[in-house]
Image: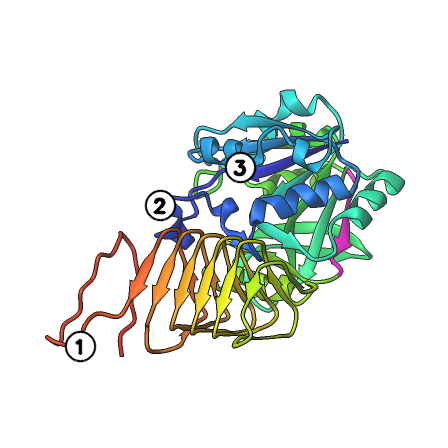
């Protein structure tokens, strides 16, 4: 059995962050989102993994490498998708790599708390033509939705205006080789994409067996900032604290906090769960719960909580608490002199600034 991770796409909902970084490499609890998917596949016993890549292929190759960091027997191949023409299109361009074997298709910006071991075990045991992961959601209009009858999938609709079910397709699927027949038979949707929901519907209509599998534990599609912050919170809730850096006597650490090697904490309070990356300096600051700070950052005279700060950023003497924020790489946030009273900005495309 093989794995196929989809890591193309432009990440438009995360701009301006994704103007300079692949959305699948945005960190959650200081680990790229994509790595959670790879770990899920490896944890289910899958060692041969193909990654669909697009415009950000060089960055993803550099981050992932050949896969050996997840085990000497893990192999990662890269499959180029020049244009994001849909999930079923990604299946078609991976046909040579998959070579007729059953496979797991995993969307690279998804995180599942419970992994996919039970999904893979169920597929191997029951041997349907497709197995799709479903979960109840409060807003089914935003997802592909499945309708069930007597425990079987009878209909799938992509982002329905009037959903007949609240069961959304989670970004994990299992297929045998019949999915290639389906992907070749369907036509592009209104958004000019080959939809995986249409391909699965073809399997249903053609009499192939498509079985549902309800997800256990939480699932997050990290395509939006609020979902990344929520995934960060959920993962930080599971960590165990470890202080490997230098914390002076004037500082206070409470709760589960990971402080990596080379970190310097002076006259500060850090409330967990939180993680502080290697080489970061924190002084005269308050780091609140559910905050991840990557390596080589500098946080001085600042309060921050429920946030993610990426590598190499500096936040100095802000004056007010930073909350529910995602701060990119090598960003500088600082307080300007009080006079003259004026704002000074250097802001990238599609940025958002709130002032009070």
Q: Which residue is mark 1?
A: 338
The one nearer the camera, 101 or 112, is 112
Q: Mark 2: which secondary structure?
A: helix
Residue 150: percent from left, percent from top: 82, 57
Q: Quadrant of residue 272?
A: bottom right
Q: Residue at x 68, y 63 (%)?
A: 239
**Closer to the eye: label 1 or 2:** 1
Q: Which residue is mark 3?
A: 63
The one nearer the camera, 222 or 130, is 222
Inter-mark Cα distance, 2 to 3: 17 Å
Q: Is residue 103 left or right of residue 127?
A: left
Residue 210 highlighted magenta (yes or no)? yes
Which region is colored magenta? Answer: 208-216
Residue 148: percent from left, percent from top: 74, 56
Residue 306: percent from left, percent from top: 50, 70
Q: Is residue 66 left or right of residue 298?
A: right
Are the residues at dot 2 and dot 3 in contact (C-beta closer than 8 Å)?
A: no
**Closer to the eye: label 2 or 3:** 3
Inter-mark Cα distance, 1 to 2: 32 Å
Q: Which residue is mark 2?
A: 19
**Closer to the eye: label 3 or 1:** 1
User: Mark 2 vs mark 3: which is more N-terminal?
Assistant: 2
Q: Residue at x 58, y 44 (%)?
A: 34
């Amino acid at each position: 059995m093989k794995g196929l991770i989809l890591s193309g796409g432009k990440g438009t909902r995360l701009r301006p962050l994704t103007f300079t970084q692949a959305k699948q490499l945005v960190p959650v609890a200081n680990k790229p989102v994509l790595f959670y998917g790879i770990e899920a596949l490896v944890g289910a016993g899958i060692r041969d993994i193909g990654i669909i890549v697009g415009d950000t292929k060089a960055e993803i190759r550099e981050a992932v490498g050949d896969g050996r960091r997840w085990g000497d027997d893990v192999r990662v191949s890269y499959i180029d998708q020049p244009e994001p023409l849909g999930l079923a299109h990604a299946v078609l361009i991976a046909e040579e790599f998959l070579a007729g074997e059953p496979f797991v298709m995993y969307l690279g910006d998804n995180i599942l708390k419970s992994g996919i071991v039970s999904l893979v075990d169920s597929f191997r045991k029951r041997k349907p033509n497709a197995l799709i992961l479903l979960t109840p959601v409060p807003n089914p209009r935003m997802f592909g939705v499945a309708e069930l009858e007597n425990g079987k999938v009878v209909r799938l609709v992509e982002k329905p205006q009037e959903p007949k079910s609240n069961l959304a397709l989670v970004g994990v699927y299992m297929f045998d080789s019949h999915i290639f027949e389906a992907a070749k038979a369907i036509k592009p949707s209104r958004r000019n994409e080959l939809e995986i929901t249409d391909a699965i519907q073809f399997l249903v209509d053609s009499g192939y067996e498509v079985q549902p599998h309800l997800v256990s534990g939480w699932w997050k599609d990290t395509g939006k900032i609020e979902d990344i912050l929520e995934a960060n919170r959920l993962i930080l809730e599971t960590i165990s604290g470890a202080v490997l850096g230098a914390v002076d006597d004037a500082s206070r650490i409470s709760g589960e906090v990971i402080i990596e090697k080379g970190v310097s904490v002076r006259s500060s309070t850090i409330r967990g769960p939180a993680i502080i990356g290697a080489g970061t300096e924190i002084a005269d600051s308050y780091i609140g719960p559910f905050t991840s700070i990557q390596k080589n950052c500098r946080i001085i005279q600042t309060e921050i909580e429920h946030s993610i700060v990426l590598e190499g950023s500096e936040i100095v003497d802000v004056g007010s608490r930073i909350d529910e924020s995602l701060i990119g790489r090598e960003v500088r946030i600082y307080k300007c002199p009080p006079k003259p009273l004026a704002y000074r900005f250097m802001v990238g495309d599609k940025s958002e600034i709130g002032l009070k």
